[in-house]
Image (cartoon, grey):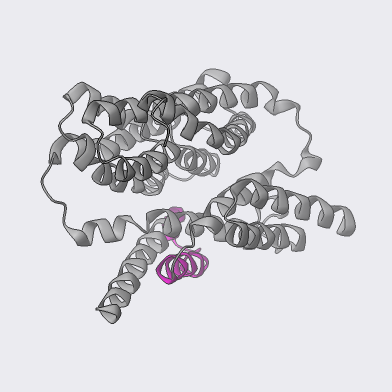
Amino acid sequence: MIDNISLWTVIIGLGLGSFGLRFVFLGFVGDRPIPEWILRHLRYTAVAIIPALVAPLVIMPKATDGAFDIPRFSAAMVALLVGYVTKNVIWSMVGGAATLYLMLYLLG
Amino acid sequence: MANSNSPFKLGMIRGYPFILVVLPFALLFGVVGTEAGLNLFEVMAFSIVVVAGAAQFTAVQMLSDNIPTVIALLSSLAVNLRFAMYSASLTPYLGDAPLWKRASVAYLLVDQAYAVSAIEFEKQKGWLTNDRLAFFFGAVLAVVPFWFLGTLVGALVGSAIPPEFALDFALPICFLAMIGPALRTLAHVGAAFTAAVMSIVLVGMPHSLGILSAGLIAMAVGAEIERRMKRGKA
């Protein structure tokens, strides 16, 4: 159960913080140039933070109390591969979900 | 491009296809939030105050794992660091708009509206700041209402979905679906791979700090690969 104080701290803090990140250059920098090294690091945030978040969930799923799970692992690999090959988010989700249900049915 | 469309209408036309991405993701957030024990008001507050799917999922996931509030907040904000890049990239096009308009752009600066705007602004050399603002808000109007609506529907039906559907794994699949298409260069692949490996290696760090650490290391790796590849070409 999530307690109320931490929930609202996160909702409001994340709201203000996200707005701050979105506003920082538009609002404060105007038309001054931005250092290239900052932009270079920012370009990789999505492909760095999201895999860091997902990798433990794929290898040690919550649903199996952290035990490696073939259906979930194969679903993750199919979703990644389909997304990489087709460049299409929807097909990737469909591929991942179909693999998960098929493997759960076959092995369950 | 046909001149018959105003920039606002063109923004909506460019934005609409992304409903296919935004709506399922929003539904899922409503479901996941409800399953984590949030009530309708709390789930909606997340989507309206934060307006950033990946960070909202991260926050709910970490809060339900009882990770300390500060760590949950920092890790979710790290997911949103990309917004600073969007902000930087749109500044040359919108920097001279009035402050309240720039603030409105900032609040609504979602991935899809950014992506279509960055492409269109580059193409439409003749546009003035007002045309660009109209295009941006057109794109926003095409997708953001569906983020709110999807969250609402997801939260209303959420508790009715039985455990056989293995919804615990919907979030990893959604995130991986976003990563696959983003692996455009060796630097992106290097960053993603480093992040995954380091996150597993650091899984024992207290309070899930391994996730944040792995992400920051991986950002540096991506930036460094890019720098070396550019130097190699020059």
Give, as a single range, the part of the protein colored magenta: B186-210
Q: Nearer the viewer, residue B191 or A95?
A: A95
Q: Along the horizontal axis of the image, is B68 left or right of A72?
A: left
Image height check: is B201 above or below B12?
below
Examine the image and state in which quarter residue B98 appears: top left
Image height check: is B213 above or below B134?
below
Residue at 67% across, 50% down: A91
Residue at 34% across, 56% down: A43
Image height check: is A106 above or below B51?
below
Residue at 30% across, 33% down: A19
Examine the image and state in which quarter residue B9 appears: top left
| Residue located farthest toward the top when viewing the structure as drawn | B41
Q: Nearer the viewer, residue A67 or A17?
A: A17
Q: Along the horizontal axis of the image, is A28 left or right of A6?
A: left
Q: Nearer the viewer, residue B181 or B212?
A: B181
Give percent across and percent down for residue A38.
22, 57
Magenta stretch encompasses residue B199: yes
Give percent across and percent down for residue A14.
37, 35
Tell me if I can see residue B137 in this picture. Answer: no
Q: Quadrant of the C terminus of chain B?
A: bottom left
Q: Quadrant of the N terminus of chain B?
A: top left
Magenta-highlighted stretch: main secondary structure? helix
Examine the image and state in which quarter residue B111 appears: top left
Give percent across and percent down for residue B219.
35, 62
| Residue located farthest toward the bottom when viewing the structure as drawn | B232
Magenta stretch encompasses residue B76: no
Give percent across and percent down for residue B103.
25, 27
Q: Nearer the viewer, residue B133 or A19?
A: B133
